[in-house]
Image (tube, rainbow, N blue to C red):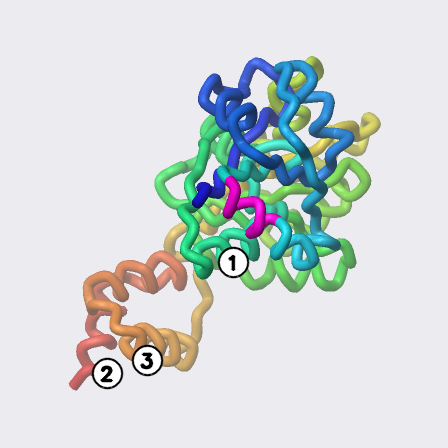
């Protein structure tokens, strides 16, 4: 029985493909690629001639049985157009199916746009929330932002060049003028990192054509700025206790999310337990 490998590929610079990734791609019996034409350029550059099959959002469920059958013959590698498979790209369903069928599943780590942008953003990296692409429609996008406006975690979003100014407009409106790092074309020739506040980023990217894929790293809400009501806190405490969270862990998490003091949250938890 083979192993299913999730192989990270470069987000721009081909030198970022690791020697181990090259070996796994060469030795596998099949490469499941998000776009075989796009990945063909990468594979040709490294002289990799392994059989390929397309595996993308609209055929991912149809291809499960075929890929599982190839795992009976040997190792299968999964790659996306760029970065780590299954992170905002197909892969989750295949991983679950492979595990359920008794196959081993392993990562071949490498480039990941959200993590790369976070590490150079200058914003806190000890706790963060990755939210992928914001919704395309303005109303849905603003609603999604309102759901995280009180969280103290650093927030990470992906965005296309066609909607980046709309996204920045809504971030400014819903989250306020927070610190932000806008990463564009990472590891490529026109790589750019813009750091400042959201209003400044909006002015900057309105003034010139937006090109390339964007990663937005946004500062979290300041501690103490939350607006949770008493009933919201009580509901969150009940949910956490029902899920088996310890009082100390629950009080820290809810304090970070709500803006309430940890001491006050802990007191309410003890009252609920009693």
- At numbered mark 1, what does the secondary structure look like: helix, strand or loop? helix
- At numbered mark 3, what does the secondary structure look like: helix, strand or loop? helix
Mark 2, residue position? 272
Q: Is residue 146 above or below residue 132?
A: below
Q: Give whichever of 115, 61 is nearer the camera.
A: 61
Q: Give whichever of 244, 147 is nearer the camera.
A: 244
Quadrant in the picture for the C terminus: bottom left
Mark 1, residue position? 97
Q: Nearer the viewer, mark 3 or mark 1?
A: 1
Mark 3, residue position? 238
Residue ranking furthest to the bottom? 274
- Main SS of the magenta part reads helix
Q: Position of residue 92 (x, y in %)?
A: 54, 53
Please say if the residues under marks 3 and 2 sit with CB atoms less than 8 Å apart.
Answer: yes
User: Range of the magenta residues?
Assistant: 67-73
Q: Position of residue 267 (x, y in %)?
A: 20, 73
Q: Is residue 179 visible?
A: no
Mark 3 / mark 2, whichever is N-terminal: 3
Quadrant in the picture for the N terminus: top left
Q: Tell me how far mark 3 sits from mark 1, CA to CA.
A: 34 Å
Q: Is residue 72 magenta?
A: yes
Mark 3 / mark 1, whichever is N-terminal: 1
């Amino acid at each position: 029985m083979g192993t299913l490998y999730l192989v990270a590929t470069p987000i721009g610079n081909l030198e970022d493909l690791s020697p181990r990734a090259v070996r796994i791609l060469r030795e596998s019996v099949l490469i499941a690629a998000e776009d075989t034409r796009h990945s063909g350029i990468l594979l040709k550059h490294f002289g990799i001639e392994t059989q390929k099959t397309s595996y993308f959002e609209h055929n991912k469920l149809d291809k499960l049985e075929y890929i599982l059958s190839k795992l009976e013959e040997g190792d299968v590698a999964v790659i996306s157009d760029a970065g780590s498979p299954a992170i905002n790209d197909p892969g989750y369903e295949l991983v679950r199916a492979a595990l359920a069928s008794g196959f081993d599943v392993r990562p071949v780590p490498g480039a990941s746009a959200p993590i790369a942008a976070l590490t150079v953003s200058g914003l806190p990296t000890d706790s963060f929330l990755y939210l992928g692409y914001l919704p395309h429609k303005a109303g849905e996008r603003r609603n999604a932002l309102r759901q995280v406006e009180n969280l103290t975690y650093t927030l990470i979003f992906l965005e296309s060049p066609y909607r980046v100014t709309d996204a920045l407009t809504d971030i400014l409106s819903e989250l306020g003028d927070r610190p932000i790092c806008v990463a564009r074309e990472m590891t490529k020739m026109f790589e750019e990192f813009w750091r400042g506040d959201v209003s400044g980023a909006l002015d900057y990217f309105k003034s010139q054509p937006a090109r390339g894929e964007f990663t937005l790293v946004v500062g979290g809400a300041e501690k103490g700025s939350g607006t949770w009501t008493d009933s919201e806190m009580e509901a969150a405490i009940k949910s956490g206790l029902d899920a088996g969270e310890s009082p100390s862990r629950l009080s820290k998490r809810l304090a970070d999310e709500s803006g309430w003091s940890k001491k006050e949250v802990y007191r309410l938890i003890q009252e609920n337990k009693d």
